[in-house]
């Protein structure tokens, strides 16, 4: 028998209870999902069982440096996913705006943010996505940009649709945008997903729920900000991204 | 002001393939470099099966140990919006390769340099569907036995775990093989930088 949503909900609740008990007992908050998270079935054979080995870094540690990207790596239209084809894509036009910060709150300047997403109907322009929702000939769903001097970034796109997947019976992913981010050190590399406020699918999604800490989960959800909406044009969302991990300029402050 | 809390990681998922990989992603060595070498390997899961949808990123110094890199890994064509490929001259130090249907990845690069007495290595970052948080490991080279013995990370590991970080020389082709095992027997050593 295929796994039901109830089976997944029960496992999610058990792992959340265990986390909250550990927190009550003095465990530090978990900012990231555990790699071993059974409700997300694909994780079962793809997480290491040995603990990670801590590395004591020094200024010459390769991972405290990072690849650099520049104006040749992005075009002027890469941040606007609604203008990459000759016609207008279908769906709700939105902007996603925010800042890229390090764990001390300092802006991360001139670094690469890439994103990809499903179209308004919940379909990716990827051959392996065979979900029977229409492709949009005017929407690919891929963008990139370099952050500004204040760490700021902005994308114009279409609000993606929810879509089904095969983790369990009647499994649906809440609408989300995938982000890939570089920091000022390779240790700060981040791939994640941004969600939209008040999505009724949150509670049913083992990928979002893999972040067992409630406040950490909230950090994956953008804020609707009316001042970012443009009259008769687009709805505005704000989402700041905060990178984890040491950098060459990293200090103990605030940690 | 209190420090902001980090944004949690999430899996790269199954559908990044039309977004993140780019043509020439594994061609780190500029076209004319005569000292290019090939590094390659498979990614395996806990059942020993190849992982056909992993994304491997490499970051490394140039042969002289210079870690400043250069832009231009994924140069874009402002006319068509497509990819131009690297410029054939600059060493960016960065590779991004999607594993193929056999779970295999390959990159053409140069041997990184390092400080005297320290073993050179390539930093490796692995993403995959099913992997909620990427994994860092390191590709060391088998020639530097002496430097490996004094390297704090390698020296801290048991011999059988240490060898998961050292690539195997393939003299016939001048290449180095580095398999990544996500789980189970001969599980690769993965690193934590906190």
Image (cartoon, rainbow, N blue to C red):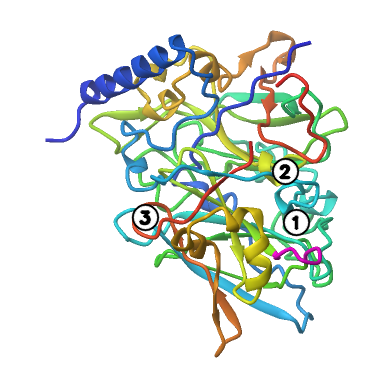
Question: Tag 1: Cα neighbours inside 10 Å, few (<14), some, or many (≥20)?
Answer: many
Residue visible at 84% across and 55% down?
B68
Q: Where is residue B116 in the image (x, y as percent from the top left)?
A: 81, 67
Query: Chain under label 1?
Result: B
The mark found on residue B76 in the picture is: 1
Give me the C-alpha separation between circle 2 and circle 3: 35 Å
Residue visible at 48% across and 39% down?
B11
Query: Chain under label 3?
Result: B
Residue topped by disc 2: A78
**Pick the front one: A229 or A69:** A69
Give me the C-alpha separation between circle 3 and circle 1: 34 Å
Q: Is residue B150 magenta?
A: no
Residue visible at 74% across and 29% down?
A102
Secondary structure type for disc 1: loop
**Pick the front one: B157 or A85:** B157
Start and end of the magenta stretch? B114-120
Q: Position of residue A138 (x, y in %)?
A: 58, 42
Q: In this view, does B149 lie to the left or right of A1?
A: right
* Label 2 in the same subunit as label 1: no
Secondary structure type for disc 3: loop
Q: Where is residue A96 in the image (x, y as percent from the top left)?
A: 67, 25
**Pick the front one: A49 or A161:** A49
Residue topped by disc 3: B45
């Amino acid at each position: 028998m295929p796994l039901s949503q109830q089976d997944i909900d029960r496992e999610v609740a058990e792992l959340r209870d265990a986390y909250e008990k550990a927190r009550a007992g003095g465990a530090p908050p978990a900012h990231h999902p555990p790699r071993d998270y059974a409700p997300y079935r694909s994780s079962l054979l793809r997480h290491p069982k040995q603990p990670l080995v801590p590395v004591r870094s020094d200024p010459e540690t390769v991972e405290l440096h990072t690849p650099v990207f520049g104006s040749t790596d992005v075009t002027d239209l890469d941040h606007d996913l609604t203008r990459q084809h000759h016609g207008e894509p279908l769906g709700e036009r939105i902007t996603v705006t925010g800042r890229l910060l390090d764990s001390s709150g300092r802006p991360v300047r001139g670094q690469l943010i890439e994103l990809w997403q499903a179209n308004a109907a919940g379909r990716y322009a990827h051959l392996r996505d065979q979900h029977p929702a229409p492709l949009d000939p005017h929407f690919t769903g891929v963008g990139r940009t370099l952050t500004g001097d204040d760490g700021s970034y902005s994308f114009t796109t279409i609000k993606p649709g929810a879509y089904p997947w095969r983790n369990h019976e009647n499994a649906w992913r809440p609408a989300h945008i995938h982000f890939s981010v570089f920091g000022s050190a390779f240790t700060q590399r981040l791939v994640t997903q941004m969600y939209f406020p008040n999505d009724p699918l949150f509670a049913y999604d083992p990928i979002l729920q893999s972040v067992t800490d409630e406040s950490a989960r909230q950090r994956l959800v953008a804020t609707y900000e009316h001042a970012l909406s443009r009259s008769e044009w687009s709805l505005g969302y704000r989402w700041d991204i905060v990178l984890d991990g040491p950098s060459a300029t990293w200090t103990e402050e605030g940690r | 002001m209190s420090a902001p809390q980090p944004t949690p990681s999430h899996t790269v998922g199954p559908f990044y393939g039309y977004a993140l990989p780019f043509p020439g992603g594994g061609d780190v060595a500029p076209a004319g470099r005569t000292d290019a070498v090939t590094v390659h390997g498979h990614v395996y899961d806990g059942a020993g099966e190849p992982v056909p949808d992993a994304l491997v990123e490499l970051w490394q110094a140039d042969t002289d140990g210079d870690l400043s890199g250069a832009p231009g890994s994924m140069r874009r064509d402002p006319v068509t919006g497509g990819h131009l490929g690297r410029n054939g001259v600059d060493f960016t130090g960065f590779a991004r390769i999607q594993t193929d249907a056999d779970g295999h990845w390959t990159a053409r690069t140069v041997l990184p340099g390092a400080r005297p007495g320290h073993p050179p290595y390539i930093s490796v970052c692995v993403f995959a569907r099913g992997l909620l948080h990427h994994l860092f490991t390191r590709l060391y080279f088998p020639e530097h036995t002496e430097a490996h013995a004094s390297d704090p990370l390698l020296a801290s590991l048991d011999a059988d775990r240490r060898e998961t970080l050292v690539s195997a020389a393939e003299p016939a082709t001048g290449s180095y093989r580095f398999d990544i095992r996500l789980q189970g027997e001969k599980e690769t050593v993965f690193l934590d930088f906190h």
